Amino acid sequence: MTPDIRTFERLAAEAIDALPEPFATASQTVVVQVADLPTDEMLDALGIDDPLELTGLYEGIPLTEKSSFDQPMTPDVIWLFREPILVEWRDRGDVKLSDLVRHVLVHELAHHFGWSDDDIALIDRWWE
């Protein structure tokens, strides 16, 4: 049975809850949305032709670039795209779906937090 959007939402929530502090709490301020595919506007903005190439997207101003003078117009959003993630999961065949969702989510959170590759490595031990 193909995992639905609700399953992805649950996996994303579990991934955020499993983050070490202070990241778990700070991640609660980012809205996580799951969609089957990115919109044409998202793909055009990134110069991507194939919607299956984009597994996740961060929309917002990274914390490292925000100012106390910034007035938030909308919340920061992380998009997880179900179909591209499922394609990668099936193609790999050697990872759990929950691990792949967590990996995509952590890398999108990295954009929000302004994490370095070393910071990401402390949280996402993807290669192990």
Image (cartoon, helix red, strand yellow):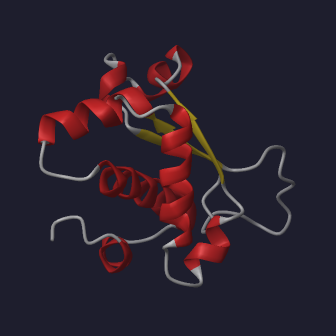
Residue at image position (83%, 52%) is: 72
Most extreme residue toward the bottom is: 21
Task: Give the image location of residue 16, x and y in percent.
Answer: 54, 65
Judge from the rendering whether residue 26 lies leftward or rightward of residue 67; answer left or right: left
Residue at image position (51%, 60%) is: 109
Residue at image position (38%, 37%) is: 55
Quadrant assignment for the C terminus:
bottom left
Depth check, front residue: 112 or 13: 13
Q: Is residue 38 above or below residue 28?
A: above
Residue at image position (47%, 53%) is: 108
Task: Give the image location of residue 98, x and y in percent.
Answer: 36, 54
Most extreme residue toward the front is: 1
Q: Is residue 25 above or below residue 53?
A: below
Q: Is residue 127 above or below residue 85?
A: below
Task: Give the image location of residue 71, x and y in percent.
Answer: 87, 54
Depth check, front residue: 75 or 95: 95
Depth check, front residue: 51 or 63: 51
Depth check, front residue: 78 or 62: 78
